[in-house]
Image (tube, grey):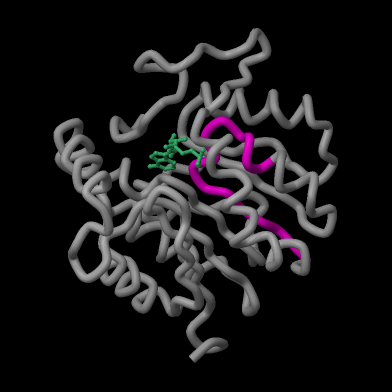
């Protein structure tokens, strides 16, 4: 088990319901703003969507209910999160959400089951609470699995031109690095360089509430 992860239900956050469902306060703040940024793509797309670092599973079941055109594949590294995802899935009864699978982005050769091309890959609030190689491996994997017309969507806090976009993000970055020197808010330029190496190109940068961003990437050969 990677020691670089934040596990919900620890550090004073609320415990799970008896069936293992966890509730992330950030989900309630982020679910609609993120949907506003990526929902139009998802409602028009067809195919498989993989979420990496699904956490509680609340985003997957909410967005899956709005997109019967897609099949959703949630994933995480923690057993407690997999249990939560499975419990939210059961409660929602969404036919288009598959059982959670364990995917650890610290592994360079990560894959997904059953495998093949993905019309979208989502990864929210993961890159700043994990070592840089998670970003490297995420991008490389997106390069392997993203469909010709697919999108990779990242959400979270990012620096721009090496600078924090708000004092609150700078303070957050300090607290992250104090918890783990390998964590920290990533710079957009560094993330874009990884994307380029993986054959991807940025298509959108969308300002989000509380100084967060949604970053969208597509295959460079289709969008340059
Ligand atoms: C801050 S939570 C965000 C959860 C969810 N995406 C959301 O936005 O509510 C970070 C998530 O990243 C996952 N994570 C951390 N390191 C990971 C890794 N190496 N591979 C895959 N997931 C990881 C954690 O288990 C956790 O669920």
Instruction: Assign the N terminus to one quadrant of the image.
Output: top left
The front one of 47 and 16 is: 16
Judge whether 211 appears above or below 197 on screen: above
Q: Is residue 169 above or below residue 91?
A: below
Residue 55 vs residue 62, the one in the foreground:
62
Pick out the residue farthest to the top: 18
In which quadrant of this rendering is ligand 1 seen?
top left
* Residue 157 appears in view: yes
Taking the spot 40% from the left edge, 74% from the top edge, the residue there is: 198
On whether residue 54 falls in the magenta region, the answer is yes
Q: Is residue 3 magenta?
A: no
Find the magenta span and give its range.
46-60
Q: Is residue 195 left or right of residue 159?
A: right
Q: What residue do we see at 51% from left, 12% from top? A: 15
Residue farthest along the bottom direction in this orientation: 224
Q: Position of residue 174 (x, y in %)?
A: 16, 40
Residue 132 in sight in this render: no
State which quadrant residue 59 falls in. top right
The residue positioned 63% from the left and 35% from the top of the image is: 58
Image-based side of 67 in relation to 211, left or right: right
| Spot occupied by residue 49 in the image (x, y as percentages of width and height) | 66, 56
Depth check, front residue: 70 or 213: 213
Q: Position of residue 73 (x, y in %)?
A: 66, 47
Which quadrant would residue 151 be assigned to in this image?
bottom right
State which quadrant residue 18 falls in: top right
Q: Position of residue 102 (x, y in %)?
A: 53, 37
222 on left or right of 176: right
């Amino acid at each position: 088990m990677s020691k670089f992860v934040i596990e919900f239900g620890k550090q004073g956050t609320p415990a799970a319901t008896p069936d293992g469902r966890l509730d992330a306060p950030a989900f309630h703040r982020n679910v609609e703003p993120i949907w506003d940024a990526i929902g139009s793509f998802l409602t028009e797309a067809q195919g498989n969507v993989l979420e990496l670092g699904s956490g509680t599973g609340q985003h997957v079941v909410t967005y899956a209910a709005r997109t019967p055109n897609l099949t959703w594949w949630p994933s995480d590294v923690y057993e407690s999160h997999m249990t939560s995802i499975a419990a939210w899935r059961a409660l929602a009864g969404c036919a288009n959400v598959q059982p959670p699978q364990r995917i650890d982005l610290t592994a360079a050769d990560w894959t997904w089951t059953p495998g093949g091309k993905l019309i979208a890959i989502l990864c929210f609030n993961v890159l700043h609470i994990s070592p840089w190689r998670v970003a490297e491996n995420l991008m490389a994997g997106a390069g392997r699995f993203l469909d010709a017309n697919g999108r990779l969507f990242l959400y979270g806090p990012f620096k721009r031109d090496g600078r924090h976009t708000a004092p609150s993000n700078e303070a957050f970055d300090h607290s992250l690095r104090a918890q783990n020197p390998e964590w920290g808010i990533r710079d957009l330029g560094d993330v874009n360089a990884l994307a380029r190496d993986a054959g991807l190109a940025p298509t959108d940068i969308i300002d989000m509430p509380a100084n967060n961003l949604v970053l969208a990437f597509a295959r460079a050969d289709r969008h340059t």
